[in-house]
Amino acid sequence: MKGSRRIKIIGLFMIICLMIQLVSACGTSGESNKHKKMYVEVITKSTTSAYWKTTFAGANAAGTEYNLELSFDGPSNEEDYERQNQMIRDAIDRGVDAIVFSAIDYNANAEAINAAVEKGIKVVVIDSDVNSDLVSCRISTDNYKAGQMVGEAVLSGTEPSLQVGIVNFDKNSENGQKREKGFRDYVANNERVNIVSSINVNSTIEEAKAATIQMLKENPQINIVVTLNEWTSLGVGYAVQELKLKDKTRVVAFDSNVVSVGMLETGEVDALIVQNPYAMGYLGVEYAWMLLKGEKVKETHIDTTTTLITRENMYNPENQKVLFPFD
């Protein structure tokens, strides 16, 4: 009897110890989850251009400020929407808390984004929109207004006749289409303007250069070229350089990097419409954090600044900050 009683006491003691360990483990787990960093994935059109590197810098600054775990991804070119969709699916599988996203294809990226939201992931769109009503917030350039700024720059010239060639990027990217529409609407009723040719190319320097050279050779009357993103701007600039047309052809381009600013100085480019990718990256992550904290977002559409920069105003201190945000 004594042995049996002793065994019961030891068994009871072991059960109590096990319960204490379980309670302790639960408490530790709860404390760990309480301090776990929220995970935000930033998926953009690509990762290699100066524009996207600046976007990532802004996102990283917000991630540091709000103590978030961030990852950055994007396809190798700005036409590969299928790769973007796979990145979204991978992010869902990893259990991210939020996605900050710039769409390559307004329609073709929609299903994957909807799937992410349906899994409870918060989605903030930056730069280029996607056809989804489930997105929490959109942060971008007012692309229609930016296109009108292109029109303003075109009409600022003194040429009596403005023979225009347009070099745009992917037709399925909403921001490029809005920019072109803004430009066309702005110049539509001006008798000086004649749009001679309009082409769409992949967002690569090589393709934009080759297509621009062909366009200018086939239409030698063109004396204005309008182009609407970073890669096409560089391609157009190199085409004008190769054909030695900088004194005969004005170029109104988009975005800035060291090369395009150099072209502005030397004359291959005459004006740059410069966006604010740093602000897009920063605000995209900041708003993702706000949504994850359960805060109500008052503004669901936020426009970031856009600046028209020419050779005449490029050395102004404020414009130098726009052209070289890290200096």
Image (cartoon, rainbow, N blue to C red):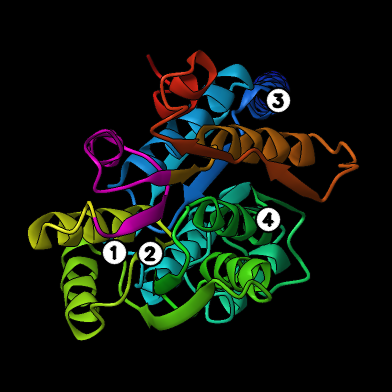
Q: Do the numbered discs 2 and 3 sit on residues whose CB atoms are within 8 Å? A: no
Locate residue 222: give its quadrant.
Answer: bottom left
Q: Which is more foreground, mark 1 or mark 2? A: 2
Q: Give above or below for 88 relative to 33.
A: below
For marks 2 and 3, give the CA distance. 59 Å
Locate residue 267, reporting x and y percent. Answer: 25, 42
**Circle 3 Cα neighbour tier, 10 Å, few/some/many (<14 / 14–19 / ≥20):** few
Q: Can you identify the residue that label 3 sits on? A: 34
Q: Is residue 185 left or right of residue 39?
A: right
Location of mark 1 (residue): 77
User: The residue under label 4 is which amino acid type?
Assistant: Lys
In the image, what residue occupies the spot 31% across and 61% down? 232
Identity, as a three-letter code, of the amino acid under mark 1: Asn
- Disc 2 designates what residue? 224
Return the mark for residue 315. none
Distance from the alpha carbon under mark 4 to that under mark 3: 44 Å
Q: Callout 4 environment at 10 Å: few (<14), some (14 to 19), or many (20+)?
A: some
Q: Name the residue at the front extreme.
A: 160
Residue 205 image position (x, y, % from top left): 21, 60
Which mark sits nearer the N-terminus, 1 or 3?
3
Residue beneath disc 4: 145
Span colored in magenta: 248-271
Crowding at label 1, few (<14), some or many (≥20) Cα neighbours within 10 Å? some
Tell me the element at label 4.
helix
Query: CA separation, marks 1 and 2?
Result: 27 Å
SS of the residue under disc 1: loop
**Which residue appears at 43% of the width and 40% of the height?**
71
Horizontally, residue 285 falls left or right of residue 271, namely right
4 or 3: tag closer to the N-terminus = 3
Who comes first in sequence, dot 1 or dot 2? 1
